[in-house]
Image (tube, helix red, strand yellow):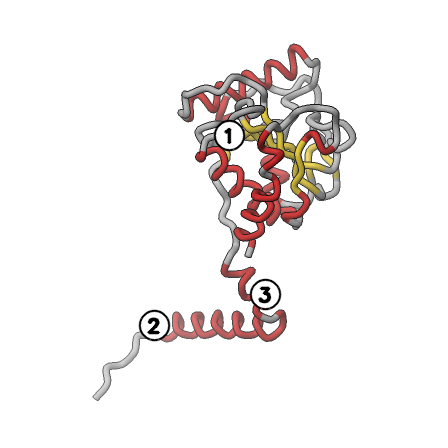
């Protein structure tokens, strides 16, 4: 004699069966590629917002562009290659960048949208960038690359890489963050560039030589 099945278990089974049917239907409608897309969704990395790292308020309102960006542009800060890989240092690095951009360059806020530290910690750069990224429909106009500021997400990588490679923690964080950004904005992995692709600069140094590797790693993350 079998034991009666609790109503909660029956309901849970119905939900699981419904979910399984939905996945099967998705596979039938979109093929294996659609099923893989579900399985390989990129989780949001930890990104400290401006308030968390102690940003100053912008000197004037940021401009929100009512379109998705169509590319990512990689930078290096050209700051010395610190051996302090701590979270506290990452926050100080973000404050130093903002001070330089506002007080020396005369910009209204940090020029880049996001910053990646040598320890692999991610911070929001220009105010509003994280909110826009998480919602995936708009972007904040930046000040990181002439001619691209209203259509490209700018990522500053702490350090200078003209003759040395970045730490592995920075690289791994960059791959994950680029994959997440591509996912949120439906940007193809092929649309990841370096600053020097658009302006007369050495930025981002040897990271530019590794763009094919970065694109491939991001594509693999996206499935």
Left or right: 219 as drawn, with respect to 149? left
What quarter of the picture does the N terminus occupy? bottom left
Residue 94 visible to the viewer:
yes
Q: Secondary structure at mark 3?
A: helix
Q: Position of residue 3 (x, y in %)?
A: 23, 82
**Residue drawn at 53 percent across, 37 percent down:** 174
Residue 107 at x, y percent in the picture: 70, 18
Which label's residue is closer to the chain start, 2 or 1? 2
User: Disc 3 or disc 2, which is closer to the eye?
Assistant: 3
**Circle 1 sits in a helix, a strand or a loop, which is it?**
loop
Q: Determine the secondary structure under disc 2.
A: helix
Q: Residue at x 58, y 36 (%)?
A: 130
Nearer-the-camera pick, 4 or 23: 23
* Residue displayed at 27% across by 81% down: 4
| Rendered view: 173 above or below 127 | below
The residue singled out by tag 2 in the image is 9
The picture places residue 21, in percent across and down from the top left corner, at 51, 75
Q: CA distance from mark 2 to mark 1?
A: 55 Å
Who comes first in sequence, dot 3 or dot 2?
2
Relative to 162, say whether 194 is above or below: below
Of label 3 and label 1, which has the lower sequence position? 3
Name the residue furthest front. Answer: 163
Outermost residue, top direction?
104
Mark 3 vs 2: CB contact within 8 A: no
Mark 2, Cα crowd under 10 Å, few <14 / some 14-19 / many 20+, is few
Badge 1: how crowded within 10 Å, few (<14), some, or many (20+)?
some
Closer to the eye: label 2 or 1 = 1
The residue singled out by tag 1 in the image is 165
Which of the two residues, 203 or 183, is positioned nearer the viewer here? 203
The residue beneath circle 3 is 33
């Amino acid at each position: 004699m079998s034991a009666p099945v609790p109503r909660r278990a029956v309901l849970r089974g119905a939900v699981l069966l419904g979910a399984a049917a939905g996945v099967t239907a998705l596979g039938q409608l979109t093929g294996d590629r659609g099923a893989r897309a579900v399985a390989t969704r990129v989780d949001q990395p930890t990104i400290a917002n401006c308030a968390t790292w102690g940003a100053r308020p912008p000197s004037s309102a940021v401009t929100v562009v009512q379109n998705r960006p169509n590319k990512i542009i990689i930078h290096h800060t050209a700051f010395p290659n610190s051996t302090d890989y701590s979270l506290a240092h990452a926050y100080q690095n973000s404050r130093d960048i903002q001070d330089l951009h506002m007080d020396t360059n005369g910009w209204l806020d940090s020029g880049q949208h996001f910053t990646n530290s040598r320890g692999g910690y991610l911070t929001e750069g220009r105010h509003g960038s994280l909110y826009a990224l998480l919602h995936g429909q708009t972007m904040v106009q930046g000040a990181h690359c002439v001619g691209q500021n209203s259509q490209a997400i700018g990522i500053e990588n702490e350090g200078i890489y003209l003759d040395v490679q970045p730490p592995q923690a920075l690289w791994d964080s960059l791959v994950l963050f680029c994959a997440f950004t591509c996912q949120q904005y439906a940007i193809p992995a092929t649309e990841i560039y370096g600053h020097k692709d658009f302006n007369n600069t050495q930025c981002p140094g040897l990271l530019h030589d590794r763009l094919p590797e970065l694109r491939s790693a991001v594509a693999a993350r996206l499935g």
